[in-house]
Amino acid sequence: MERGRIDLVEVDEPALGAGSAGEIIFQPEIGCLCGSDRPYFDSARRLYPLDPGLSLHEIVGTVTGTSGTRFQPGSRVLAVPLEHRGLFQRFRLSEERAIAIDPRVPLEVAVLAQPLGTVIHALKKLPPVLDMDVVVVGQGPIGQIFTAVLRNLGANEVIALEPNGARLRMSPRMGATAAVDPTREDPVAAVARITRGRMADLVVEAVGHEDQAIDLCARLARKGGRILYFGVPEETIERVSWRELFFKNLTVHTSVGPDFARDFPLAMRWLAEGRIDLAPLITHRFPLREVQRAYETFRDRTDGALKVLIQFPPAA
């Protein structure tokens, strides 16, 4: 893949061989683009061309072969490949990096158990959010999921902060009690107004990469509050106003690496039992042959794009 361009190329068919105990051959049916896929597509800081398979990691599909015991050929699973190397028509994967899909969940919704699982994993690191005033900075797909989950968990105010109008209009539907456009209103003043001057108990940074917003998060948090930095950062973040975090006695949490034994299965259960509805986040669907257009739509946020799905062809 060159910068900003995806080519569909032929690679060797994956196979289970000697020493492959506990692995599966996985055939994707639906993939879903994530903000952490975007830097592989067009980052000025990466060297191109990339190796095949980059980048896709939110995927549901079918087990076509196995050397393990957890699944049988024909089992439908959510699979999370290592290092985002999932943009294949079939690939080999440890069975420990897959969970069963609940048959009550439509396949295109089941794929959202992956990002939901990462949000659940992150919030388990915090004290109970019941009655907290919370700000979610960034209302892309992950920010929207944080908004929905925080509302479900009983937060008092769930304040969504986002400059993109289409995304901000989705936030109340996902549970935001207030939606603030920082290009139209000073976000610090807005949060002060909504919280009657107290500011936020918790601020979630759901932006990350080149647009990270940790300094803003520090300004939005109350003294003794918390920041959950979820957005994937660059290798280094320059010119962070650490003094603000220091003198406000803020606690900064980070989160990566959800648990396949607990977090993803719980996310699948929430979707199956109707505890949370993430279907409104699915805005676009593209067949694999239009993968270039899918990535461009996601990157450019075309037509209010949130969750952009890639539909793989059926087995030959």
Image (spheres, rainbow, N blue to C red):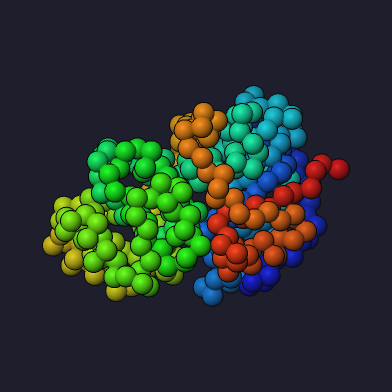
Using residue 72 as the reference point, say whether residue 154 is left or right of it: left
Q: Is 137 rendered above or below residue 271? A: below
Question: Where's residue 234, x and y in %?
Answer: 43, 66
Does the rendering let one see residue 294? yes
Question: Where's residue 16, x and y in %?
Answer: 73, 37
In the rendered image, which quarter contains the C terminus? top right
Does the rendering let one see residue 93? no
Using residue 241 as the reference point, say whether residue 169 is left or right of it: right
At horizontal 47% and vertical 58% (from top left) the residue drawn is 169
Using residue 75 as the reference point, say whether residue 96 is left or right of it: left
At horizontal 33% and vertical 73% (from top left) the residue drawn is 238
Using residue 185 as the reference point, say whether residue 66 is left or right of it: right
Which residue extends farthest top?
Answer: 69
Which residue extends farthest left?
Answer: 247
At horizontal 55% and vertical 30% (from top left) the residue drawn is 272
Question: Where's residue 304, x and y in %?
Answer: 56, 62
